[in-house]
Image (cartoon, rainbow, N blue to C red):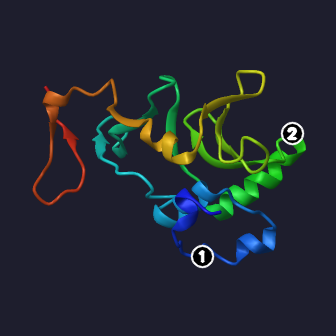
Amino acid sequence: MKKGFQLLKTKDITNSIIDYGIELPEKYRLFIDTFNVGDNSFFSEEYLDNNYNQKRTLLLTFYKPMEDICFVGFNTIKDSISLKEDIEEYQLSRFLPVGYSSYDAGIVISLEGDDRDVVYFDDPNSDGLVRLCDDIFEFVKGLELRLDKDIDVSKLYKNWDEDFWRIREN
């Protein structure tokens, strides 16, 4: 008997998933059918860094239950499948890399077994995977935006026709 998210109709992702032979967990499939992944998957504010004359991210995304994980973004399904092929040699064949943090650590989900849909942190500084939560929706609930700690909010301003912030010099 179907229940929960299985009752909902979702869009097809792409035929390329079938070509790669990957059966995605139900909640993760619902997630990528509903939300943008890849570039522009997050709300973002930028500021002009006067030292380098280039735009930088003003708000950083952290996974609140583990304060040190600065989450950068979600992979496209195509990138996830490509990365999966790369990590299979590291005994992670039953996992799909779905996102990444600021220091080259991956966010992966289990594709099979009792922990299907469970989200893990593939921390290069530890001995294996660290369980984060039961599914991708719980993971997203744990994300929060924080202002870059080096920015003085009182000095931020925007010009009328610009889509980024500037920092007022003293």
Tell me residue 151's x, y (percent).
27, 28
Residue on which disc 2 sits: 90
Q: Which mark is residue 156?
A: none
Residue on which disc 1 sits: 12
In this rendering, would 25 be left or right of 62? right
Foreground pick, 163 / 42: 42
In this rendering, would 56 be left or right of 90? left
In this rendering, would 60 be left or right of 68? left
Tell me residue 157's x, y (percent).
14, 41
Foreground pick, 64 / 101: 64
Residue 147: image quadrant is top left
Foreground pick, 125 / 35: 35
Tell me residue 58's x, y (percent).
32, 39
Residue in the picture at 54% in, 59% down: 5
Kind of residue indicated by mark 1:
Asp
- Crowdedness near tag 2: few (<14), some (14–19) or many (≥20) residues, C-alpha within 10 Å: few
Residue in the picture at 15% in, 31% down: 155
Q: Is residue 73 visible?
A: yes
Q: Secondary structure at mark 1?
A: loop
Between the C-alphas of marks 2 and 1, the distance is: 30 Å
Residue that protrudes farthest toward the front in the picture? 1
Foreground pick, 43 / 29: 29
Chain-order first, disc 2 or disc 1: 1
Kind of residue indicated by mark 2:
Tyr
Q: Foreground mark, 2 or 1? A: 1
Eyeballing the image, is 38 above or below 20?
above
Tell me residue 89's x, y (percent).
89, 44
Residue in the picture at 38% in, 36% down: 144
In this rendering, the count of numbered labels is 2
